[in-house]
Image (tube, helix red, strand yellow):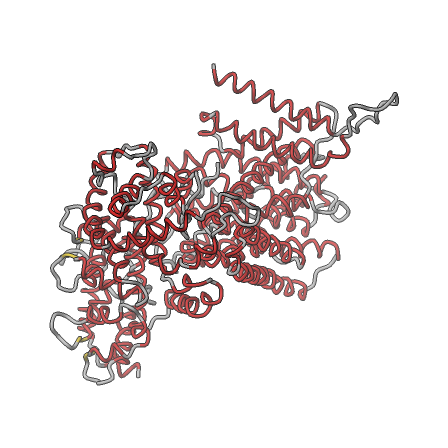
Amino acid sequence: MGSRASSLLREEDIDEIKKETGFSHSQITRLYSRFHSLDKGENGALSREDFQRIPELAINPLGDRIINAFFPEGEDQVNFRGFMRTLAHFRPVEDNEKNKDMISGEPLNSRTNKLHFAFQLYDLDRDDKISRDELLQVLRMMVGVNISDEQLGSIADRTIQEADTNGDMCISFSEFTKVLEKVDVEQKMSIRFLH
Amino acid sequence: MLKMRMRMKMLLLLGWCCGLVCAGQNRSDPRGQTGFPVLSINYDYVQMPFEVSLWILLASLMKLGFHLLPVLSGVVPESCLLIVVGLLVGGLIRVMGKNPPVLDSQLFFLCLLPPIILDAGYFLPIRPFTENAGTILTFAVLGTLWNVFFMGAVLYGACRLEAGRLASVDLLSCLLFGSIVSAVDPVAVLAVFEEIHINELLHILVFGESLLNDAVTVVLYHLFEEFAHAGEVTVGDVFLGVVCFFVVALGGVMVGGVYGVLAAFTSRFTSHTRVIEPLFVFLYSYMAYLSAEVFHLSGIMALIACGVVMRPYVEANISHKSYTTIKYFLKMWSSVSETLIFIFLGVSTVAGPHTWNWTFVSITIVLCLVSRVLGVVGLTYIINKYRMVKLSGKDQFIVAYGGLRGAIAFSLAFLLSSDDFPMKDMFLTAIITVIFFTVFVQGMTIRPLVDLLAVKKKKQSKCSINEEIHTQFLEHLLAGIEGVCGHYGHRHWRHKLDRFNKRYIKRCLIRGERSQEPQLISFYNKMELKQALMLLESNSSANLSAGDTAAPQQRSRKTLNISKEREEEIRKILRANLQKTRQRLRSYSRHTLMPDAEDEDEDWSETRIRKQRRMSFMTLPALRESPAVRGSRVESDRPSVLFTLADERLESRGHKPSVTFCLDVEEKPLPRCVSDPGADQLLEEDESLHQRH
């Protein structure tokens, strides 16, 4: 199974992915075999059903949103490149990369990009603002069904009021970043991919 | 001038206390023989408790004194000052011709140490601890083992080379000495680190290590003691020693866990006897400690496990007053214990028989430093391969430099029997010197070094609902992504534990509806209550600063809109409260603090949400004053807000609101409300919980 999987992945592809995402060779091959095991239809791309089969996502309150985050705008299939691009956000930040000059700008796993990924999970309509309704939806997902709407509403109001600095009753990305400046995002949003 | 007078007063009090203590060592005279004794002295009757109280009084007065002299306490850590005081007191007693008391090991281990450890364990920040558990365990177990064997071996070599008086020190004694001296001491670490406010990661690393290395110390100490007694060591014995380590550590944790669960379960039923709730917490923890000590398991780990396991459930069950009581009692006892320990260390130094040996002592001190540095650097090199956030050189330096030794080492050495260990006095002298060195030199210099190296300090952040929400959000997100990658990291297991906890354990151990409450909601409720109280307190001074008016006004604008919709609900609530408060008795019995505590709990579940909202209404600054109300205003501004609301509603219905109504509603105990008079004190200290002054 392992050798068959890696034979479908060409060396040039691996090199491109390495350059784009920063994963190492062994990490890419390992994640490719994981990709392949998820891909029940064997067509080289994952659909939403493939993700929904993962047990951890089924019980996760944010399961649907996470699945949506893998798929680019309007598409129903994600290939291995897209899969890796999303996962690259969760690579731990390494010290030697902080000084590297990348032509394409910041690496995908920089703090700003990590926060931007999280921000987009809140912001469904992609208007660069978290409105009260979007916040309420997320809160409802995390808290369950036993809490009344009014209480959730007051929590949402309080949250927006704490974060909002320009008075537009929404949380923009810069306000989001500012609120989380004391949180150790580099550690909280990183997964240790084994070498 | 004022300071001089205070210093004189302090000295006088100190002298008087010491005089009394010394005089107390005498036997009292029998009464005179002529006639009926009108006034007689019978000091023997009260001698023991009297002396104990005097010592504690002395310790507390010293603490008081230090904080009247801020210059000194800014430079020198409190522990150093206390040891100096102990030296002075010991010297005074010696000058008076008596023998100063030595720190009795039984007293230390059974009475002085448990409060400090319980305080540390109950308020242990769980999240940083579990995130760094691997690192902490590595330092505690492997680091201590390295220290013991390295020090033991090098000391033995030095004793061999030196010959002369040191020739009789054999390998086993050196190893035993190494095991006593290498353990980082939680009391000393707490005392020093509390004052320097370094960042949470370093604090939890050093502190966690000092707590967990107790298991290693206990095992090695008993092991070497047994070997020295038995006289010979076989390979089987060594293997048994390793097994013993696991038994001691895991057994201690299990004992603590069992008692913790018992305490949590008991607290489920205490809704009718709120007054003794704190007692259960203290008793179960102490029993856990004692039970572990019976079997020579690690008492410290039992205590920590008990506190950690019991806390989330107990806090959901007990009243807020009990929570406050527990917090303050723990802080008070641990503070007094710590003070007493350091003072006694000073006194014991003056008292104990000393055998000074330049070589031994100097090698010990040098070795302590060297082995600690080597151990930390070596272990960090290995640990960094597995950590996501690596430990930098600065971090390693602080961890190495913060390895202070303290009274536990002294007490363990004191427990040695002189028959098996003829060089016990030399050991004691060396240990005292090491303790003095680490506490004075390292304790005093660590603060300027921290500033010099620009180590990150503790972030003074107020609790923020944003951080809580987003942190939970990220936890869920990362758990999902780990699931996608097929990666079973520690988040996966933590998620599983959380789910197990929520489904089974919380149902058993938490009373009533709170077992279903999500963590986010409890956090939010606590925050709202705190803020409501803060605003009430600041309303009474009637001076809102310019910076605050912006936020509350925004809030009031929003909450004003909501209140218009909820008029009927407010009317209902107020009506119900009016009826209740009329029946309220002002009596105070020893069994219940609040006669209608039961009523409060019954309709708690229904009106809880409404009460929360009412509290948020109370954050309205006095904006809604209408001219009709202003005339009948009471002097105290504090209940003004609800008063105005109540007034308007009730005036429309023809009731005349009374003063008592208003104040009663304010003081009506809400389930998680703080109705203590010292509310603002409590809040400030909540934020700086770890400061013990």
List x then y, in percent, for residue B365. 57, 39
Residue B679 drawn above or below residue B571? above
Q: Residue at x 40, y 54 (%)?
A: B128
| Residue B34 left/right relative to B213 | right
Q: Position of residue B660 (x, y in %)?
A: 39, 40
Position of the N terminus of chain A, as image quadrant, is bottom left
A139, above or below B679, in the image: below
A190 on left or right of A121: right
Q: Nearer the viewer, residue A73 or B664?
A: B664
Q: Which quadrant of the figure contains the C terminus of chain A?
A: bottom left
Coordinates of residue B124 in the picture (x, y in percent)? 46, 51
Q: Is residue B18 left or right of residue B575?
A: right
Give coordinates of residue A145: x percent, y percent.
Answer: 30, 68
Residue under the point 42% across and 48% down: B669
B439 or B148, which is in the foreground? Answer: B439
Query: Residue B89, relative to residue B604: is it above or below?
Result: above
Foreground of the two, A86 or A13? A86
Residue at coordinates 65% horizontally, 47% vertically from top-left?
B412
Closer-to-camera residue (A66/B592): B592
